């Protein structure tokens, strides 16, 4: 198995069949393969096989900079396999809002009302976690508005953590772009209009010309650093004002070097005439959405852009509700099979923490805010990780009664397994040794 593959690599190095550089590259591939395989076994519910792989690879010596992370992954996967409720492993993926303050005032967002910032005490706790974290997603408000943000980014980079940022892109400049590219940070930029009037109407206080200037600068700096691995993602929120522009976002994405296009519906929590998915619904919009989905899918395929289309699948002819709201016989059959195989509905409470823009903590962004596990302003991350509330999440999922704590979207099969099980993205393991 994997351990003998590792020994062969070492022998090749010792006998001079491989240069040190080649050895490291092969070792990196091997480590990635192991991590993906162990996780896959747990996703499939094959705990026995997961444990077998973990036992086989636990003596592999990886470069010192990632040893703690590798050991933590193996420990965490063994704890998932053994259905542990109190974990010795540490959190692996952190979603962290750093501030609720923002430089603009978008018409669909009221986050700023929280008037909240990540407390300084928590910064040290997060920095202490860095050697174990695989991925951290920073968000706001606007991250570049938070005065300690650079310190957090520097620490993540020092510890080779995969970083993602969601930003409006307006506070980018030559200095911070160079750093982001150098640190291989994945950037998600939220742009909801392709013309000055639509963009500035939605993103009140923003300047479209400045955005375009920043996008051009980002493209230029990225093109000078082609070996770096930062990815650009374009986030678009669909609403009444921009609905006629959505089909043209693939062209914009190509022009500025975005490799992924994420198209999202207006969320249910914000009541507005612009919210055509929840409050201002009508057939005209539904027809447009059906048409947009088709066009985006075709264009993105042609242009080789990864499309993450989260818009609902409307069926107008029979006036049916969106497809994803129907629970089919197939869903029920899958659910029964999952219970029989003793599969966990979701792995988030074993892997993740989500710090919201008012300090509330839940395991995952999708989790029910009525069941928080703590608050970063009052609680320590280490304590939250195994506190009573977190144990309840894990126990209810193990006992197959997640409906008592989780959102119905997750329990009733409307959220893809890929999201619930956090299917591993090998981009997370990019580290240069
Ligand atoms: C709250 S913003 C904060 C990060 C950053 N300032 C930005 O603009 O991307 C994060 C994401 O949430 C999305 N968002 C804001 N209000 C929303 C709503 N009512 N429903 C769904 N998504 C929303 C934004 O479009 C953005 O992509």
Image (tube, rainbow, N blue to C red):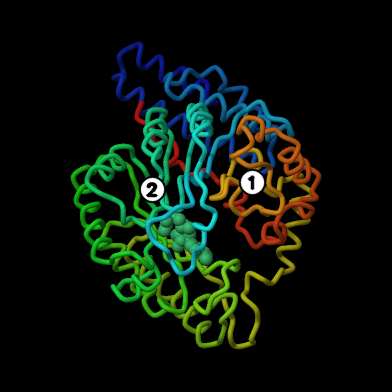
Nearer the observer, 15 or 62: 62
401 on left or right of 163: right
Q: Residue at x 53, y 82 (%)?
A: 286
Q: Residue at x 38, y 48 (%)?
A: 145
Q: Position of residue 244 (x, y in %)?
A: 39, 80
Q: Of the numbered discs in the image, which one, if any, rests on residue 389?
A: none
Q: CA distance from mark 2 to mark 1?
A: 24 Å
Nearer the observer, 224 or 267: 267
Judged from the image, the secondary structure of the residue bearing numbered disc 2 is helix
Whether residue 382 is situated above or below residue 342 in the rendered picture? above
Q: Residues within 10 Å of mark 1 (few under 14, many from 20)?
A: many
Of mark 2 and mark 1, the one earlier in the sequence is 2
Q: Residue at x 74, y 38 (%)?
A: 391
Q: Are marks 2 and 1 in contact (CB under 8 Å)?
A: no
Visible residue check, residue 216: yes
Whether residue 225 is situated above or below residue 156 in the rendered picture? below
Q: Is mark 1 within 8 Å of ligand 1?
A: no
Quarter of the image where one finds residue 366: bottom right
Q: Of the numbered discs in the image, which one, if any, rests on residue 362?
A: 1
278 on left or right of 164: right
Q: Residue at x 39, y 57 (%)?
A: 260
Nearer the observer, 351 or 384: 384
212 on left or right of 239: left
Q: Of the numbered discs in the image, which one, if any, rests on residue 145?
A: 2
Whether residue 321 is situated above or below residue 143 in the rendered picture? below
Q: Position of residue 431 (x, y in %)?
A: 38, 32
């Amino acid at each position: 198995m994997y351990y003998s593959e590792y020994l062969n690599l070492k022998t090749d190095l010792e006998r001079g069949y491989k240069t040190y550089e080649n050895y490291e590259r092969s070792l990196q591939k091997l480590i990635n393969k192991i991590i993906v395989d162990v996780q896959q076994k747990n996703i499939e519910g094959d705990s026995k096989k997961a444990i077998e792989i973990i036992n086989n690879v636990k003596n592999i010596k990886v470069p010192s900079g990632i040893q703690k992370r590798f050991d933590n992954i193996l420990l965490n996967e063994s704890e998932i396999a053994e259905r542990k409720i109190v974990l010795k492993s540490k959190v692996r993926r952190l979603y962290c809002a750093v501030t609720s303050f923002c430089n603009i005032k978008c018409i669909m967002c009221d986050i700023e009302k929280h008037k909240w910032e990540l407390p300084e005490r928590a910064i040290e706790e997060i920095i202490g976690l860095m050697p174990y974290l695989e991925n951290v997603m920073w968000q706001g408000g606007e991250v570049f508005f938070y005065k300690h943000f650079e310190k957090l980014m520097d620490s993540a980079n020092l510890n080779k953590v995969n970083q993602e940022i969601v930003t409006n892109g307006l506070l980018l400049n030559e200095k911070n772009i160079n750093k982001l590219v150098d640190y291989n940070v994945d950037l998600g930029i939220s742009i909801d209009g392709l013309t000055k009037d639509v963009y500035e109407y939605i993103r009140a206080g923003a300047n479209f010309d400045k955005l375009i200037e920043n996008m051009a600068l980002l493209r230029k700096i990225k093109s000078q650093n082609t070996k770096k691995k930062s990815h650009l993602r374009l986030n678009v929120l669909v609403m009444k004002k921009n609905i006629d522009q959505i089909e043209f976002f693939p062209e914009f994405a190509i022009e500025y070097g975005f490799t992924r296009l994420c198209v999202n519906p207006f969320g249910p929590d914000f009541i507005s005439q612009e919210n055509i998915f929840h409050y201002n619904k009508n057939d005209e919009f539904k027809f447009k959405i059906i048409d947009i989905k088709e066009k985006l899918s075709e264009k993105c395929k042609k242009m080789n852009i990864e499309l993450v289309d989260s818009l609902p699948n409307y069926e107008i002819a029979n006036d049916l509700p969106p497809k994803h709201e129907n629970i089919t016989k197939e869903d029920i059959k899958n659910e029964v099979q999952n219970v029989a195989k003793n599969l966990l509905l979701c792995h988030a409470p074993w892997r993740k923490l989500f710090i919201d823009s008012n300090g509330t903590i839940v395991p995952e962004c999708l989790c029910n805010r009525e069941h928080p596990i703590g608050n970063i302003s009052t609680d320590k991350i280490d304590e939250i990780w195994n506190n009573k509330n977190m144990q309840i999440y894990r126990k209810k999922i193990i006992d197959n009664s997640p409906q008592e704590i989780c959102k119905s979207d997750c329990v009733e099969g409307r959220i893809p397994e890929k999201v619930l099980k956090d299917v591993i993205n090998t981009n997370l393991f990019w580290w240069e040794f």
